[in-house]
Amino acid sequence: MAPCMFLFALIPPVAWIVILIATGDIPSFVFHFFGLIGFIIPLWGSVFIWRMDVEAPRDEPIRFNRVRRKVYVYRFHHDGLRPFSRTAWGVRTEVYDWDDLRAEACSVYGPMGSGGLIETVTLAVVKPGTHHVIDRFHFAHEIQQGEMYWAMAQLFMQQGPQALPTFPRPPRDWNNEGVNFNLARRLAPKVRWPAEIDLESRTAP
């Protein structure tokens, strides 16, 4: 989204040069119009990039509660078309039934120079008793990683924590990791679950 905005920002000066070459003069209304567009588009893109850097949380964790058979998702929402909006941006916690989740893998070639393979795994939320998808959220960046995470989630929800492998290292805690040399990470808000959701996701009914 951000690169597209910068490309659009190049349109006014290019059009300005074309008019100048073609006519030898620039009408006042054209000067003011393209001057305004040349100001608004970079401002629009700058606000979007700034908010993505400073408002996106340090992590977007997912909690699985085996006893309640619920999945708790900490999601950051943003809207490139409304970079000044307060309601379209921000963290929202959502709760889904485990039985309504389906893993989906996607692999596409994106516009990355000579071409690049983009892989992602999302979890689809289906309407109970149907295959109609009503929501999706990100799960993993690579298909192989997503398959591994999804297999561990299934093991945990079906058999409990004793079925999981023993991990040599403790899980990463983005909130407490040192980010002294990363300005974006330092500005990013820490993960803070709402008190009710935090208690519910950690306890049994």
Image (cartoon, rainbow, N blue to C red):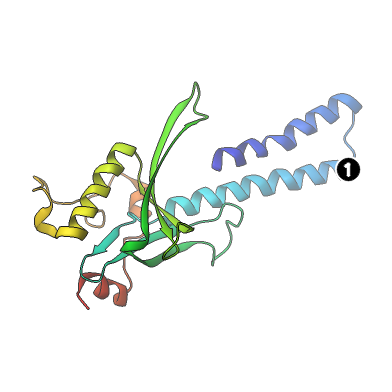
- Residue 104 in the image: above or below residue 66: above
Rendered residue at 22%/56% (across/down): 176
Q: Quadrant of the C terminus?
A: bottom left
Q: Is residue 134 visible?
A: yes
Q: Amino acid at mark 1?
A: Ser
Q: Quadrant of the N terminus?
A: top right
Residue 148, given in percent of the width and then of the height, sits at: 24, 43
Rendered residue at 85%/24% (across/down): 21
Dividing the picture into quarters, in which one does residue 24 lie? top right
Q: What residue is disc 1 on?
A: 28
Residue 131, given in percent of the width and then of the height, sits at: 45, 57
Left or right side of 125 for 85: right
Rendered residue at 63%/45% (across/down): 42
Left or right side of 202 for 136: right
Is residue 63 or residue 179 the one in the foreground?
A: 63
- Number of disc labels: 1
Going by the picture, which residue comes out furthest to the front? 129
Could you say whether the residue bearing mark 1 is in a helix, strand or loop?
helix
Is residue 122 or residue 27 the one in the foreground?
A: 122
Residue 162, given in percent of the width and then of the height, sits at: 9, 57
Left or right side of 40 for 89: left
Going by the picture, which residue comes out furthest to the top? 114
Density class for disc 1 (Cα within 10 Å; few <14, some 14-19, many ≥20) is few
- Residue 13 in the image: above or below residue 69: above
Residue 179, given in percent of the width and then of the height, sits at: 27, 49
- Residue 190 in the image: above or below residue 27: below
Dividing the picture into quarters, in which one does residue 4 lie? top right
Q: Is residue 179 visible?
A: no
